[in-house]
Image: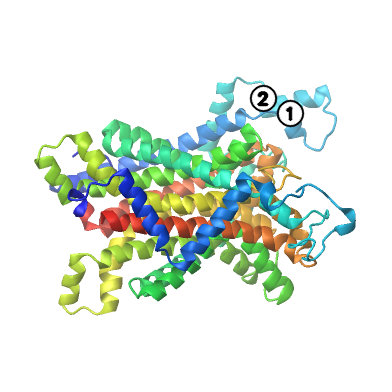
Amino acid sequence: MTISTPVELIVAAPGRKSRGLAQAIARRIGIAVIVIWGAITASFLALKSMGGDPVQSIAGGVVQVTPELREQIIAKYGLDDSFFQQYLSYLGGVLQGDLGTSYALRRPVVEAIAEQLPNTMTLLITATVFAVAVAFIVSLTTAHRGKRVRSTFQALESIGVAVPAFWLGIMLITIFSFGLRMFPSTGANGVAALVLPSIALGLPVAATLSQVMRDTLEKTLDEPFIVTVRARGAGEFVVRVRHALRHSLVSVITLVGWLSGTLIGGAVVVEQVFSRPGIGRMIFSAVLNKDMPVVLGIVIVAAVFYVIVNTVIDLLYPIIDPRLR
Amino acid sequence: MTTLALKPTISNSIREVWHAITRAPITVVLSALMLAFFVLAAVWPNLIAPGNPLAADPLQTLKAPSAAHILGTDENGRDVFTRIVHGATPSLLTGLGASALALIAGTLLGVIAAQGGKWADAVVMRFVDILLAIPGLLLVLVIIAVMGKGTLNVIIGIALFSVPGYARLVRSEIMVIRRSGYVDASVSLGIPRLQIVMRHIVPNAIRPVLILATIGIGSAIGTGATLSFLGLGPQPPAPEWGAMLASSQSYFSVAWWAALFPGLAITAAVLSITVLGQYLQRRLDGRTA
């Protein structure tokens, strides 16, 4: 059997465990660096191949770009440098924590992102906690609970997956903001403004998660070792939470890693619907404005975030599922 | 377990599918009817709604549902029902196209990664990691920024960001299956590696992938509508569910029908595909389990 993942590296050499572990971690960091470099390079290439005049994009509201202004802009942003030079200087800047200057906002990208990031992170965290909590509770209580319970919750989950987040957002605003006046419809001031966007963002995720979780939970509950656990006199709660849940976590955790990317995308839409300031709205308008430094900056931040989450997940696999050891 | 005894043939499969349809529960029958309606609407919209989806009537703006306009009219006096029926084509095309593209590409990548050896695995998985590290919707935004707005580019974008999910799932499933007793048994029986992969590993790994693809058709329709809602898909005045929602959003408090029904259409289309797909999946699973 070939050794092909860091997880296997950790567990393939029990004789020299600490060395294997150090190697695996070093390898994982190497992979993380490659991925981040790849993400920067790919988006740089993609955005460089965009049509249009970058000078015009930078000049923004200025209708007529005079030759003097054009020269100024070209000099300031290094637009007459060779393609490779522009790439290298960008890459070098990123490594020093400089993501460049926004064309449209006329300020450092790092500054603009730092200003908007807390809003988006708050939204992502509350939506994730909401989604995971709902999925755990629903799947643990409804797995193997008879046909009626199953089909009822399957129907609810299917609806939850099917409802588009932006439509859900519009409905929530109509009912709870304009109708009942319980929560504000826009902005990011306080906890109340967080409730509706978190539900709009988290509910489809919760439905997907609990579908997959119940599916694997039920598969696990049918396995012979569960009979053994029951034969030892374990109660239903212990069987489900301590034994079955652990087995189904591998597939769920693979999905959580995937969903952490999906949620950031979802934030673009939800922030748009709720007119909520944040990274999502920023990148959407940046793409429309061809504001390349902002787009690249947010891609890098998102990639780093994603890489961290998934590195942790990779290291968790053998802890959760001893069969992978 | 019974796969050794049962050799599924094509006629057998058709009979199984027919069997599944005729003995289906009511939700599945309803979903099938709903999907049939949307498919018919997508293929032959004029049969269901012969009117012109672009025909504006300044005297009939934001009219509530009535006998003349069963789902009301929008802010330009266009018939909402006609527009929803004609909007089925881009939605279904997006869902099917993106899901099929992603399933094929993702499964291929997953199998190559798991079975192609150390270097193939490293290269494929780094490519997948890079794709995955860029948030899905942003990847579509970048594709659209480079290639322009429109349905085809939306399909390519959605497929591209869905690929990593399939590739990773296929790979991790194969990793677990490879350690299973029946694969060990096949290896010790001296069965060729390719045959083990095709006969034992792929069929067992493909089940959760098909579940994901089922949800995938639905979510691709949802994502497609989302991109239209953001103004990046088919351009106005073309009838498209997400775009209809975007334009009627500001009239919601005075004309709920103009935003409610396109949203219901998206939900119903996604829901019917999901319910139907999961049901057929369960039936087909039951045959091989």
Residue drawn at x 18%, y 39% as measured from the top left: A1
Note whether B215 is above or below A136 in the view shown. Answer: above
Q: Residue B138 or B228: which is nearer the viewer?
A: B228
Q: Position of residue A150 (x, y in %)?
A: 40, 71
Q: Residue A290 or B114: which is nearer the viewer?
A: B114
In the displayed structure image, the side of residue B39 where residue A80 appears, left or right: right
Rendering quarter of residue A19: top left
Residue drawn at x 20%, y 54% as measured from the top left: B2
Q: What's the mark number on residue B105?
A: none
Amino acid type, callout 1: Val
Within-10-Å neighbours for mark 2: few <14, some 14–19, many 20+ = some
In the displayed structure image, the side of residue B73 where residue A97 appears, left or right: left
SS for dot 2: loop
Q: Position of residue A224 (x, y in %)?
A: 18, 66
The residue singled out by tag 1 in the image is: A55
Rendering quarter of residue B232: top right
**Labels 2 and 1: the sequence-earlier one:** 1
Q: Chain of mark 1?
A: A
Rendering quarter of residue A266: bottom right
Q: Residue furthest right?
A: B59
Q: Residue B285 or B26: which is nearer the viewer?
A: B26
Amino acid type, callout 2: Leu
Q: Position of residue A214 (x, y in %)?
A: 37, 65
The residue singled out by tag 2 in the image is: A79
Within-10-Å neighbours for mark 1: few <14, some 14–19, many 20+ = some
For the residues bearing labels 2 and 1, Cβ distance under 8 angstroms? yes
Task: State how far apart marks 2 and 1 are (Cα).
Answer: 8 Å
Instruction: Please indicate, yes or no, whether residue A277 appears anywhere in the rendered image.
Output: no
Note whether A166 is above or below B43 in the view shown. Answer: below
Q: Chain of mark 2?
A: A
Instruction: Please indicate, yes or no, whether residue B228 appears anywhere in the rendered image.
Output: yes
